Amino acid sequence: MTRQLIEAEHVVDLKDLGLAGIRRVDGAVEIGARATYSEVLGSPLLREDLPLLPRTADGVTGGRQLTLQATLVGAACLGFPSADVPGALAALDAQVRIEGPDGGRTIGITDFLVDAYTIDLQPGEFVRSLRFAPPPSGGRCKVKHSSGSWPFATAGAVRVVVRAAQAVPVIVPVDAADDPAELTNRVTAAIAVPWSAVPASGKYRAEISPVVARRAAGELVGG
Amino acid sequence: MTVNGESRSATIEDRGLLVDPVRSELHLTGTHVGCRNGDRGACTVRVDGWIAKSCLVRTPAVDGPGITTFEGMAPDGRLGDVQQAFWDADTFQCGLCFVIEDLLESTPDPS
């Protein structure tokens, strides 16, 4: 809106709709759309059940001003391929709870992320929350040439999820018994259309993706 | 709205950014326009108790206790303690004095 890239007839402030908070619901963990990175970082529940999310939030740039305001759901809705959050949500098989004029619906994060900057959110709809079943454990590896730049490829594991390599996260199953060559082949085969943007070409991203995937998987197996 | 402890009035756009009326209507020009993208921090203010980049805050969303700008950190035209420490050490990167002040409120002895 600030840069006139999108136009909206009405802008509705959702802050009093009760969308904040991180809580356990029916054995799952639910993160409200207004839960900020700072809340994610300070949540004992997430540190215990979904530690990949605090780890991801810890790498967010922009300072405390940003982490006090920005949210996981906001990052998911932007659909920026280089952002860490969409890949982390894919690694944890997040379910996206959506409200709209026709009532509520829930879809998986990989269906929600349609393409670069494109999500499955129809006119009048908004994301209410993210819901997670706790995974067993995870590892994480990120390639980024400076703290202020966007990562070129990042991987989180139980299965390995490579982000920033194509427009949507690449999910590759991992077995502790996999040898590195097998994982390399699997990651290479899974990147159907490498994503190119100014900081790095698709070719480069595709080439380093197996490396970061192996590191993430190694952390998982080693841990 | 309450700005630096005083009740102030300003004409705002219904979907405008807070940084604009702070500078152009309230003339608190210690708040700078940098990137309008959230990358920098020269536009940092304290909004309803939280530090925020005012280029990422829509003005109508500010409906709480009010805002504090850089000028509000320096009562009577003097630098606040953190600002003075930054001045003494020749530091730069506007906005960090708010961040440090916020850190010290929650963690008085961070080292």
Image (cartoon, coloured by chain):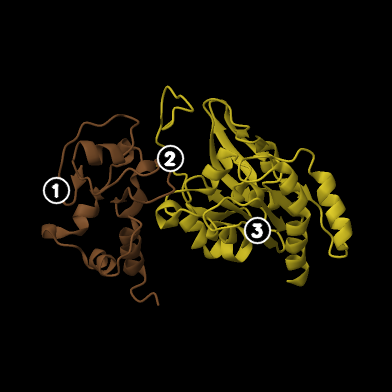
- What's the residue type where badge 2 is placed? Leu
Depth-wise, is mark 2 or mark 1 nearer the camera? Answer: 1
Image disc number at residue B6: 1
> Is A32 situated above or below B25?
below
Q: Disc 3: which chain? A: A
Q: Position of residue A166 (x, y in %)?
A: 71, 42
Label 3 to label 1: alpha-carbon separation: 47 Å
Residue A156 is situated, as x and y percent measured from the top left of the image, at 69, 57
Residue where numbered disc 3 is placed: A142
Q: How many marks?
A: 3
Mark 2 crowdedness (10 Å alpha carbons): few <14, some 14-19, many ≥20: few
In the visual, does A167 lie left or right of A149?
Answer: right
Residue A101 appears anywhere in the view: yes
Chain A: give its colour.
yellow
Q: Are marks 2 and 1 on the same chain?
A: no
Q: Amino acid at mark 3?
A: Lys
Which-is-in-front pick, marks 3 and 1? 3
Tell me the residue at 55%/52% (across/down): A149
Instruction: Quarter of the image for the C terminus of chain A: give it.
Output: bottom right
* Residue at the image point whose x is 12% and y is 58% from the top: B77
The brown-tinted chain is B
Q: Label 2 vs label 3: CA separation?
A: 35 Å
**Dot in front, 2 or 3:** 3
